[in-house]
């Protein structure tokens, strides 16, 4: 028991900046700014399912928090607090030290306090709860999109899936592109500043964790709309751009998860605002299509619709 406290104190207790009472009591105490709602989200990462059992603990630490920050970004919320519940098969101090290094690198980048959690023995799994603040009534939800709006994405899509395919020997990525693909997979950079700045501009927003079609599909389903997407306009890294016809590459772009870019809709009247935002945050934003009153997604490649079932996409009904 005391070993558990030592472990928590050594690896997880850090000074906090937004918190009335943090780690060490039976519960933490928080204060939400007036005029704000508390945005709460959770993500769990299981060894062997969400990361390779032998993956670098530092990147597991970064990613287990980054994917949660990305959910705050997608809501337009400012993340403030996290809890960390972790099951460990055994206590390996170098592993924990590296994990904490990656985890707090991300926490410090986004100024988030670790305020509590739980530590148990078991097959390696990491569960993070994140809480943030969003001005009341202004969160970016999935259900706010209107017909005939622009559909935008940040950054490049498919890079993380390309990195994963390389690690699984399903494709060989040339050396020049490998770093970029593996960085996207192991160290995703949540688009937090962009998400927060999209409040008042975007009509709906989601982060791309399960692939463009699946995640855009969530917006469309919640907003009761469809979409027309122009395949060629989806922003991708060079190694992908050179192979747009390849089936695996199409799969990476349309169905590849783990990019943690944002996909959002906005009225056409906001095009200038979005261009300004893109410059301000040095974040590329690409207009990839538009929403339609008619449900269903069409992805057009050189004038012809792609058959989406072959890319793991279930037409929602
Ligand atoms: P309890 O028995 O009340 O559940 P614990 O012994 O599990 O308390 O935890 C003691 C304190 O350490 C609590 O404040 C808890 O939130 C915190 N804590 C436990 N595990 C972690 C962890 N992995 N990361 C951060 N804080 C933790
Ligand atoms: Mg406990």
Image (cartoon, rainbow, N blue to C red):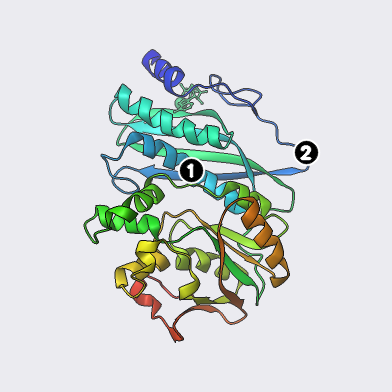
Q: Residue at x 46, y 24 (%)?
A: 12
- Left/right placement of residue 72 relative to residue 137 reads left
Element type where label 1 sits in the image? helix
**Residue 277 picture location, percent across and down:** 66, 56
Quadrant hosting residue 268: bottom right
Crowding around mark 1 (Cα neighbors within 10 Å: few <14, some 14 to 19, many 20+) is many
Mark 2 near ligand 1 (CB under 8 Å)? no
**Residue 204 picture location, percent across and down:** 63, 62
**Residue 279 picture location, percent across and down:** 63, 55
Determine the residue located farthest toward the left in the rendered image: 169
Determine the residue located farthest toward the front in the rendered image: 176
Label at residue 211? none
Tag in front: 1 or 2: 1
Element type where label 2 sits in the image? loop
- Left/right placement of residue 273 relative to residue 249 reads right
Label at residue 66? 1
Residue 42 shows up from this direction:
no
**Residue 291 picture location, percent across and down:** 60, 75
Quadrant hosting residue 92: top left
- The residue that label 2 is drawn on is 34
- Disc on the earlier residue, 1 or 2: 2
Cβ atoms at labels 1 and 2 below 8 Å apart:
no
Q: Residue at x 39, y 13 (%)?
A: 2
Crowding around mark 2 (Cα neighbors within 10 Å: few <14, some 14 to 19, many 20+) is few
Q: Is residue 122 above or below residue 35?
A: above
Q: Residue at x 51, y 44 (%)?
A: 68
Residue 97 shows up from this direction:
yes
- Left/right placement of residue 210 relative to residue 39 reads left
Comparing 315 with 301, the one in front is 301
């Amino acid at each position: 028991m005391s070993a558990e406290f030592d472990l928590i104190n050594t690896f997880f207790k850090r000074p906090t900046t937004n918190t009335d009472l943090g780690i060490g009591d039976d519960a933490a105490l928080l204060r939400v700014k007036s005029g704000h709602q508390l945005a709460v989200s959770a993500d769990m990462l299981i060894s062997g399912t969400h990361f390779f059992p032998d993956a670098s603990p530092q990147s597991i630490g970064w990613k287990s928090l980054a994917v949660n920050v990305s959910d705050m970004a997608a809501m337009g919320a400012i993340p403030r607090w996290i809890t960390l519940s972790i099951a460990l098969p055994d206590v390996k101090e170098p592993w924990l030290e590296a994990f904490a290094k990656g985890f707090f690198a991300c926490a410090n980048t986004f100024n988030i306090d670790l305020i509590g959690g739980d530590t148990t023995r078991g097959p390696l799994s990491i569960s993070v709860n994140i809480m943030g603040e969003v001005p009341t009534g202004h969160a970016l939800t999935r259900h706010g999109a209107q017909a005939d709006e622009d559909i935008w994405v940040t950054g490049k899509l498919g890079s993380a899936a390309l990195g994963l395919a390389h690690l699984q020997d399903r494709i060989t990525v040339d050396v020049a592109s490998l770093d970029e693909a593996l960085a996207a997979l192991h160290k995703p950079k949540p688009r937090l500043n962009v998400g927060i700045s999209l409040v008042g501009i975007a009509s709906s927003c989601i982060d791309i964790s399960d692939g463009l079609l699946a995640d855009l599909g969530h917006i469309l389903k919640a907003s009761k709309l469809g979409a027309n997407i122009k395949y060629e306009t989806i922003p991708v890294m060079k190694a992908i751009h050179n192979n747009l016809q390849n089936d695996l590459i199409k799969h990476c772009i349309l169905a590849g998860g783990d990019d943690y870019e944002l996909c959002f809709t906005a009225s056409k009247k906001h095009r200038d605002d979005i261009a300004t935002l893109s410059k301000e945050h040095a974040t590329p934003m690409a207009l990839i299509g538009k929403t339609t009153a008619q449900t269903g997604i069409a992805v057009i490649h050189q004038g012809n619709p792609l058959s989406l079932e072959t890319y793991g996409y279930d037409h929602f009904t």
